[in-house]
Amino acid sequence: MNLPDIKKPKDPRFSCGPTKKPEGWSLKKINNKFLGRYHRSEDVRKFIEEQILKIRKILNIPNDYKIFIMPGSCTGAMEAVIWSILGKRKVSAIIYDYWGKAWYDDMKKLNYKVDCRLALDGSMPSLKDIPTDNDVIIVWTGTTTGISINKLDFLDTNHEGLIISDVNSAVFIYDLPWSKIDVSVFSWQKALGSESQHGVVIMSPKAMNELKSKKVLPKIFDFKINDFLINTPSLLSVADLELCIDLYNESGGLLSSKKKCEENSSIINNWVDSNKYVERFVKRKKYQALSPFYLPFKQKFRYDNFFNFLSNNKIAYDIRNYRMCKPGIRIWTGPTIKKNDLIALTNWLDWCFNKFVS
């Protein structure tokens, strides 16, 4: 196949997680001082606590909120929350993303009472008349669908139940209202570009009080018998986190991160406006995420050939839709993605559509 003279992205990594490493990252820069050490040694523990303190400071997390490091990435973090905290009250599950659907399915297996509000067609399910005494669980930004709630103003200001949010694709991008969220979970693998596997749980004092009345649980999920660490962490992953956090701060922190995402998302939005082969999954602008984008195809064509071509020619890795979604492309437009790479990607996508669809 003769290829056109179109500039390729310098970095073809547009995956929604794990995401592209930040500018300036290198294996040689990772602090290897604590590798092969016991994680509860005084100096190692101090090193881990320093990274937690950085997270607290960067994200403006209240000082009386507890931060835990969990095994199993964001999934393990949320599973621990579902087992350890939920079940006492009825839960309003607001679902517009397949991860939200996964959390709902887990709650049903545990026989929790759930008010399910589901829409997986790119729209926002009903946010009206949520009982104030219900716990609420929501994915802030849907990694599979590119839809984001953006605000919690649909909840009563004196909501009695717990507000739980998976903020995995929102944290380090949005200035999240921590004081309104009782439990939040995320991993390091999205906006920071750090490694996967470990998760973070942030709990308000209100949520911590809920742990007191919970029955005996599997050790891996039981916050009551653990301190800030649950299970043994990978110190290599923590060292990578340290480097990614430092690079994030050097590049301008939260304000700069959001601005980069806004600029990146405008590139994709403008491209979609002039493209006849894909469409926005999320129609209402107020619910469109800054990252990622999920763009279903408007017609059937040789999907496998299309994605294989992009990967084999180092134009774009891992931009295929989430496995449960309709065929389309999913692009991470987070702060580690360069604008010029996105522009180059869209130019190649235009060429590929003409080549593989016609």
Image (spheres, helix red, strand yellow):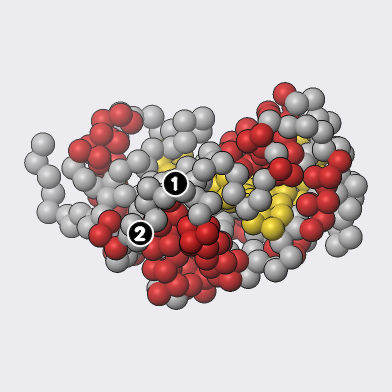
Which of the 4 image quadrants contains residue 347? bottom left
Residue at 82% across / 38% down in the picture?
214
Residue at 86% across / 37% down in the picture?
88
Kind of residue indicated by mark 2? Lys
242 sits left or right of 110 in the view: left
Name the residue beneath numbered marker 2: 33
**Upstream in sequence: badge 2 or badge 1:** 2
Kind of residue indicated by mark 1? Ser
35 sits left or right of 182 in the view: left
Which of the 4 image quadrants contains residue 101? top right
Quadrant in the picture for the C terminus: top left
- Does residue 218 lie above or below 232 as drawn? above
- Does residue 79 lie above or below 38 as drawn? above
- Residue 234's label in the rendered image is 1
Residue at 18% across / 57% down in the picture?
7
* Residue 120 visible in the shown view: no
The picture places residue 54, in percent across and down from the top left corner, at 53, 68
The picture places residue 131, in percent across and down from the top left corner, at 89, 46
Asked whether 159 or 273 is in front, the reply is: 159
* Residue 176 visible in the shown view: yes
Asked whether 75 or 352 is in front, the reply is: 75
Q: Nearer the viewer, mark 2 or mark 1?
A: 2
